[in-house]
């Protein structure tokens, strides 16, 4: 498993936590940061998947 996939998954999960915390507290900035982190994590995970496919894993 490529390190990008691991880091992407972690970023995605962190984003979900931020988004949830933002919703609970009513903090729109925190909520939006969480959504952005989730997108970053998904992209990074996809890059890792492509790298794995190229390596034949």
Image (cartoon, rainbow, N blue to C red):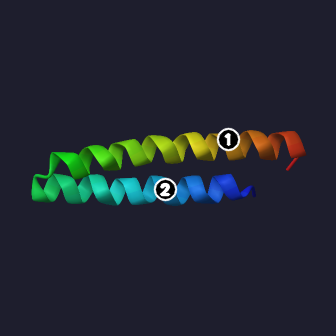
Query: Which residue appears at 70% of the width and 58% of the height?
Result: 3
Residue at which label 1 appears = 47
Q: CA distance from mark 2 to mark 1?
A: 14 Å
Question: Given the current orientation, which residue lies at the most extreme left position?
Answer: 26
**15 left or right of 48 in image:** left
Nearer the N terminus, badge 2 or badge 1? 2
Query: How many numbered marks are there?
Result: 2
Give the x, y percent position of residue 25.
Answer: 11, 59
**51 left or right of 32 in image:** right
Give the x, y percent position of residue 7.
Answer: 59, 58
Q: State the image quarter where residue 49 is shown.
A: top right
Badge 2 crowding class, 10 Å Cα cut-off, few under 14, some 14 to 19, many 20 or more, is: many
Callout 1 secondary element: helix
Quadrant of the frame with the N terminus: bottom right
Query: Which residue appears at 17% of the width and 46% of the height?
Result: 28
Give the x, y percent position of residue 22.
Answer: 20, 54
Callout 2 secondary element: helix
Give the x, y percent position of residue 13.
Answer: 44, 58
Query: Which residue appears at 55% of the width and 55% of the height?
Result: 9
Badge 1 crowding class, 10 Å Cα cut-off, few under 14, some 14 to 19, many 20 or more, is: some
Tell me if label 2 and label 1 are in contact, CB under 8 Å. no
**39 left or right of 1 in image:** left
Residue at which label 2 appears = 11
């Amino acid at each position: 498993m490529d390190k990008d996939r691991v880091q992407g998954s972690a970023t995605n999960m962190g984003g979900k936590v931020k988004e949830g915390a933002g919703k609970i507290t009513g903090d729109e900035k925190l909520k939006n940061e969480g959504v952005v982190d989730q997108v970053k994590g998904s992209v990074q995970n996809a890059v890792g998947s492509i790298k794995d496919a190229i390596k034949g894993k």
